[in-house]
Image (tube, grey):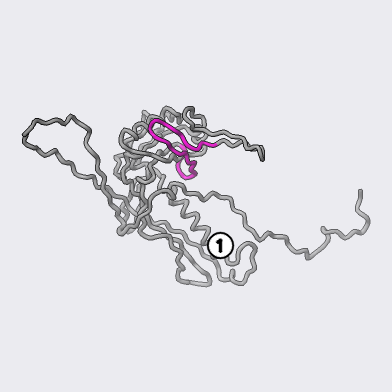
Amino acid sequence: MAQPTNTFDSYDAVGIREDLSDIITNISPEETPFYTKCRKTSASNTLVEWQTDALRSSAANAHIEGDDTTADAATATSRLNNRTQIFKNAVTVPDTDEGLDKAGRAQEIAYQTLKIAKEQKLDIEKALFDNNAKVAGSATVARELAGAPAWLTSNTDFGANEGADPTGDGTDARTDETTTLIAFSQARFDGVMQSIWENGGNPDTVYLSAFQMNVALGFTGNNNQRSSVQAGDERVVKSLAVYVTPWGTIEFMPSRENRSRDVFIMQDDMWEVATLRPTKNIELAKTGDATKRQVVTELTLCAKNEAANGGVFDNTTS
């Protein structure tokens, strides 16, 4: 059908008002599972310290009557520390914004400040998982916290060539395998779980990437996988809720901020985030016709006892 002659349609009209939704849609992920699950405490110094100890191995223990008592050899505790790291983000918005009528938010400065606060939280999660050694800092060098990989030495599975554990006190990072990466497998995972159990740990959460999660879905055995059909909406639900091993029951938690080559097996209450300065939204001094705000957090990660945790490292990622 053809349009009648001289029809004045919407393509000819001038002054049609825009149809702009008053909702801003943002699906960027903002979950921080490890940061959320870590115990929280306060710090009072940029150098946060803690102590660990261990029992000696069991031994034969039998004595004759009336025997003189000799003291057992005593061992000192281990004193560890990590550095607080300053996380800072800022936004500047011209004051002209105050007079504008915008869709989706009343004030641009409020919207942008909330946005950078969420982004900073993701930065913190990434730092906690980073294979990074602590940095003491100076007038010209920023302090940096040692991430989880820099503490794990007791229960690890990694590449056989360059792959190596760190010292375990946060002073150096893990040495990544570069020659041959190894596929994440049930055997490697179970081996680390057994090692953690033998050292006295009770891990409760595995943090791993989407790729490694799909590998874990293929694990066989004791109730590690649930598949069910919901008759009402004909959905098939397949999820790895818990994995039951002789060494304990553990939950798999997909994480977007750890490297895909790293799989962490964690006892969450053995990790602590010590906060020197809680997240704060601060208005900065005006230096012109604009409003400035910054969001600042200062904290560090404390590995309360690394032997309760483990990792399967140097995994293939494709």
Q: Is residue 54 left or right of residue 25?
A: left
Q: Quarter-wise, where is residue 167 in the image?
A: top left
Q: Is residue 195 left or right of residue 19?
A: left
Q: Position of residue 303 (x, y in %)?
A: 33, 46
Q: Amino acid at mark 1?
A: Tyr
Q: Position of residue 134 (x, y in %)?
A: 33, 48
> Magenta segment: does it hold 4?
no
The extreme right residue here reads: 5
The extreme front residue here reads: 65
Q: Is residue 151 above or below residue 30?
A: above
Q: Residue at x 64, y 58 (%)?
A: 23
Q: Which residues are magenta?
A: 239-260
Q: Is residue 142 something that shows in the picture? A: no
> Magenta segment: does it hold 251?
yes
Q: Is residue 268 above or below residue 228?
A: below
Return the residue nearer the eye: 103 or 249: 249
Return the residue nearer the eye: 1 or 301: 301
Of helix, strand and loop, which one carries label 1? Answer: helix
Q: Quarter-wise, where is residue 202 in the image?
A: top left
Q: Quarter-wise, where is residue 168 in the image?
A: top left
Q: Residue at x 58, y 50 (%)?
A: 27
All told, the count of numbered labels is 1
Q: Is residue 224 something that shows in the picture? A: yes
Q: Is residue 245 above or below residue 102?
A: above
Q: Position of residue 129 (x, y in %)?
A: 41, 45
Q: Which residue is mark 1?
A: 111
Q: Position of residue 285 (x, y in %)?
A: 45, 71
Q: Residues within 10 Å of mark 1 (few under 14, many from 20)?
A: few
Q: Residue at x 85, y 59 (%)?
A: 9
